Amino acid sequence: MIAAAVSAPAIARAQTAWPTKPIRWIVNFPPAGAADIMSRALADWFGSKLGQTIVVENKPGAGGMLGADIVAKAKGDTHIVMISSAASHGIGPVLYKDVPYDPLADFTHIHLVGTFPSVLAVNATSPVTSAKQLVDQARAKPGEVTYGSGGNGTMNHLVGQLLALSAGVQLTHIPYRGSAPAMNDLLGGQITSLMESLPTAAGYFSSNRMRPLAVSEAERAPTLPDVPTFREAGFTDVVATNWFGFSAPAGIPPEIAKRWETEIAAALASAEIKANFARLGIRPGTIGAEGYTALIKSELPRWREVIRAGNIRAD
């Protein structure tokens, strides 16, 4: 009995020892996008805190769902995590048919990581200086005004469709495999405009290569104080926030989920991460597991209704 009493705590410690090997951090979008930027900033932080290497893997495709499916299929695996998003967990599951995972049941959602607006932008050499001018151009030339985004089913895709619905015009969506090629084509004149996440486009605005026309959140972005919201520009229905969170597979031990939640909260409250995010226009997340899970539950029906009302289909 004494031996059993002594060994039980040792066994418990062995079972809860974690992490025991490198952690795979799945980014379900290409390099240089907002999800990638946030993931690498946080992965650098955690590399020294957890005592194991954090291996960031970009697994883009299907509006973020390809990478999400990798994590969903790793039930109970405590050494794989991901940046979940509005695209992979709020929009994709109600836009696409035959989604291979349940955005709630197949994941342990741990913490909101960051939020930021989408930005409508044009090449800096474009004569268009406002969202209204772009819409007027689309009204005068139906089908000719294009906007690019980093892929079908992304928030930026749907914000563009919200703008088209609100204005009653046709904006032709051009999907790309990530933000970088979309921005390259805007700069090269292959597309009229771009709907892009603020963190990804921030450097192009500061270097005056792209001109921001409007932002999608209810309030102006601190890093773009002179750029109006879509509401201010006259498109009252165009209000949306890009949200990204931290998630693991379903079935991981509660104590490990709680450890992640504590570590994520500490990282987001740190001066280092706050400064890093602020430079890019990202607001650090302040809600943990319960609040983030509730956010996802609320976003699914919201985007289902938007998609139905606009008759929006995956290309």
Image (cartoon, rainbow, N blue to C red):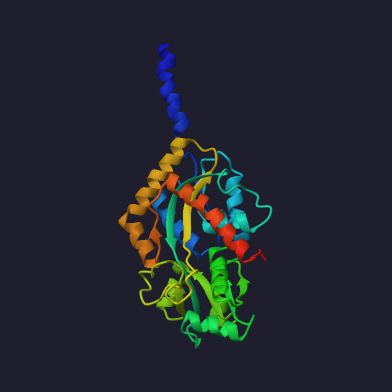
Q: Is residue 59 above or below residue 312?
A: above
Q: Furthest-top residue in view?
A: 1
Is the residue 32 above or below the residue 247 in the image?
A: below
Residue in the image at 46% along x and 25% along y: 11
- In the figure, 80 relative to 310: above or below? above
Q: Nearer the viewer, residue 3 or 291?
A: 291
Q: Nearer the viewer, residue 21 or 151?
A: 151
Q: Position of residue 190 (x, y in %)?
A: 60, 81
**Residue 166 percent coordinates (x, y):** 54, 72
Q: Quadrant of the C terminus?
A: bottom right
Residue closer to the observer: 138 or 103: 138
Q: How many marks?
A: 0
- For the point 59% across and 54% down, which residue is it? 67
Q: Quadrant of the N terminus?
A: top left
The front one of 32 and 165 is 165
Above/below status of 23 relative to 231: above
| Residue 108 coordinates in the image, percent (x, y) | 51, 43
Residue shown at 49% from the left, 60% from the top: 35
Q: Is residue 61 visible?
A: no
Regarding residue 310, the answer to whether it shows in the image is yes
Task: Return the x and y of residue 119 as percentages of the image width and height.
Answer: 47, 72
* Residue lying farthest to the left in this orientation: 271
Q: For residue 178, which quarter of the picture?
A: bottom right
